[in-house]
Amino acid sequence: MLITISGPIGSGKSTAARALAEELGYEHVSGGDIFRSLADERDYTPLEFNKLAEEDDQIDRDLDRRLRQTARERDDLVLESRLSGWMAGDYADIRVWLDAPEDVRAARVADRENTPIEEARRTLHARAESEVVRYRRYYDIDFSDRSIYDLSVNTARWGPEGVMEVVRTAVAQYDPDDDEGAFPIEGVDYEF
């Protein structure tokens, strides 16, 4: 089974994806780790790399191609990135969207990166604006469209274990052979 965990920066994607993968005995692949690694290899901060990606679409396309290839080639996987639900396309069995109010996300990022909260907030805004522009231009993806996700969770309402309980319940109830009442989600299969 392929489960995608998507959402904005600071929504709890990595925490939930790691915990879910560990619990299920699945592999966990993080698009954020891949992106940060690519930025570091080229001696950029993630924000600088995001800005560079606005001018050089090959950065995103390489990352997206790698995410898509991972989704296509691996079973028993939790694939996590802001747009992994879109990038996995028809290979995804369950698509989860995690989110939280901006203040909560900024506080999480500030704590995680040991930066002032206002700096974290500015980074959230800049990166989000950059990504919205790029993904609209590259794939005509409306970042605000949640219709492809099977489950959407506000992670500010529950702690990590509570979020896991919600996701765990959805995964446990999923039956890939039960098509009664289910409709395919169309329009998420991209070519790179």
Image (cartoon, helix red, strand yellow):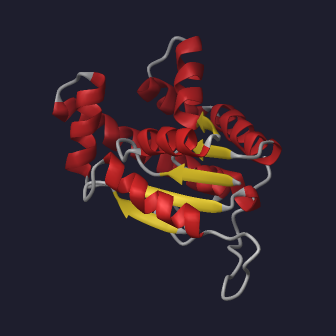
50 lies left or right of 26: left
Foreground: 77 or 80?
77
Is the residue 142 above or below the residue 6 in the image? below
Q: Position of residue 124 (x, y in %)?
A: 33, 40
100 lies left or right of 179: left
Q: Position of residue 149 (x, y in %)?
A: 55, 66
Viewer can see residue 12:
yes
Q: Position of residue 44 (x, y in %)?
A: 49, 16
Is the residue 16 above or below the residue 118 in the image? below
Indicate the quadrant where residue 28 lies. Answer: top right
* Residue farthest toward the bottom in the current orientation of the protein: 181
Viewer can see residue 121:
no
Q: Position of residue 74 (x, y in %)?
A: 78, 42
Is the residue 123 above or below the residue 178 in the image? above
Indicate the quadrant where residue 119 lies. Answer: top left
Is the residue 77 above or below the residue 93 in the image? above
Foreground: 157 or 111?
157
Residue found at x 60% / y 49%: 84
How many dots with numbers?
A: 0
Indicate the quadrant where residue 157 lies. Answer: bottom left
Foreground: 104 or 174?
174
Residue found at x 37% / y 55%: 163
151 lies left or right of 102: right
* Quadrant in which the N terminus appears: bottom right
